[in-house]
Image (cartoon, rainbow, N blue to C red):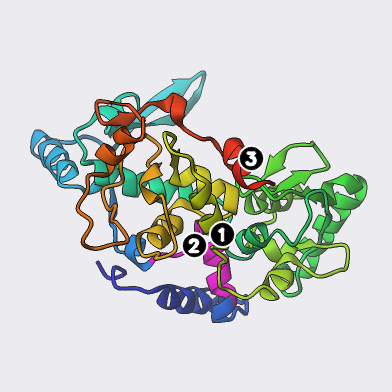
Amino acid sequence: AMASRFTPEHLAASHARFLSDRGIATTEEEAHTLIEEHAGILDPDALRQPRIVLVAGAFPAVVTASVVWLTEMGLDIALQRVQAYRVRVGDRDGVVVSVSRVFPLPDVEEFTVVPTGARARAAGRREARSRAGGAIGRLIAAGTVATGTPLRFAVPPNMLDDADRSRVAAWIAARPERGTALWTNDATAPLTWDADGNSYLAGDLTRRILVDSGGVAGTVQPSRWWLLPDGSDLTTRAATLGNRFDWSVLHTLLAALPEGRWTTYGDIAQVIGTAPQPLGNHVTACADCVHQWRVMTSSGRVADNFTWSDPGDDRDPQEVLEAEGVTFVSGSADPTLRLDPEQLRGLIGE
C-alpha cells in the first residue's frame, strides 16, 4: 500500500539512496537503469497491481475460502506452506524444511476460477520481466549492434573493492573464454557465453561470473559490465539512441497481417524487440495501427482491454475475425492459423 503510488522516478530515487547509503555511489539515472535491467520496462499501471503471497505452517478454512474469493475478484494471490521437521541422522540432530504451494496448485493453475483479465495481466508482467529491459532492450530494438559482435567482460569502476576485483580478474585469466561472449539480437537471451556456448540474459550471465569467480556479491547493472570492441559499454552505446522507441516497424507489420490469420502480442514483441505490455498499450492508443483485431492473447482470445481506434466502432472483434475466415473453439482462435515470429519476419523481411 505504501508503494502503490510510486512512479518509476520514485523507485529510482529510493534505490539510489539505498545503494549510496551502503557505499555504492549511484545516481537516480543509474538506479532507474538497474531496476529496468532487473524487471523490464517500468509501467506505472503495473506497479499499482498488487501481488500477495501468504506464507504459513497451515491455513485454516476461512483463509483458503477468502483467498479463492479474492482470486475470483482478480487479485493475484498465492498460499505457500512451510513446515519444519526435526530429524536425527546418526548422532547428529538437524531440521528439514519443506515448502509447498497450496494455492493455486501448479498443475491446475490454468483451470482455477480467475478472471481472464487478471490472468492476462499477470502473464504479461511475467513475460515482460523475462525480456531484456533498459539499455539492452533499447539496443535490441534499434539493432545497432550486429549479431555476432564480440563482447568483453570488465568490472565497472567503483563496483567492487580491490580484493573482489582481483579475484574476478584471476578467475577469468585462468580461462580467458570466461570473460567473453557474443551478442545476439534476441531479447530472451542476448549473450552467448564463450565458456560454455550457452545463451543467457545479460544479468544472469553477469551474476554467474561474479558468483563462480569466488562468491563475489554486488550490485549488477549488466549493461555496464560488457564492453564492445571499441571499448564502450552497452549502457554508453544505448545512451546514444535516446529513450523513444521506434514503433514504425510495428505499424508496417500490422499493415502486412493477412486476412484469415492471427498472431499474438508476445510474438510481435519478440520480432520488434520490446515487451508485450508496452506494445499492447501502444496499439490501444495508436491512430496509425491497422488490423489490430488480428492481434490477440497467447491463448488465442481477444484481449479484455481491446478497443477500436475509432471510438464509434462497436463491432465484436471475434465476429470480424470469423468473417475473415478465422474459426474459434470455446472462444479461442484456431492455433493452426496463428503466425509465429518467423512467419511475421517473413511478412516484412528480416
Circles 1, 2 touching at the beta carbon (< 8 Å): yes
Q: Which residue is mark 1?
A: 133
Residue 75 among magenta residues? no
Q: Say which of 111 and 165 sits in front.
A: 111
Question: Which of the labelled discs sits on residue 346, or is there none?
Answer: 3
**279 in relation to 53, above or below:** below
- Look at 61% across and 49% down and name the residue there: 187
Instruction: Decide which of tag 1 and tag 2 comes sooner along the chain.
Output: 2
Q: Quadrant of the N terminus?
A: bottom left
User: How far across and down, in percent of the image, does residue 210 sit?
Assistant: 71, 53
Circles 1, 3 touching at the beta carbon (< 8 Å): no
Name the amino acid, label 2: Ile
Rendering quarter of residue 217? bottom right
Q: Is label 2 in a helix, a strand or a loop?
A: loop
User: How far across and down, in percent of the image, does residue 138 sit?
Assistant: 62, 63
Q: Which residue is mark 2?
A: 41
- Look at 36% across and 68% down and name the residue there: 44
Instruction: Decide which of tag 2 and tag 3 comes sooner along the chain.
Output: 2
Name the amino acid, label 3: Gly
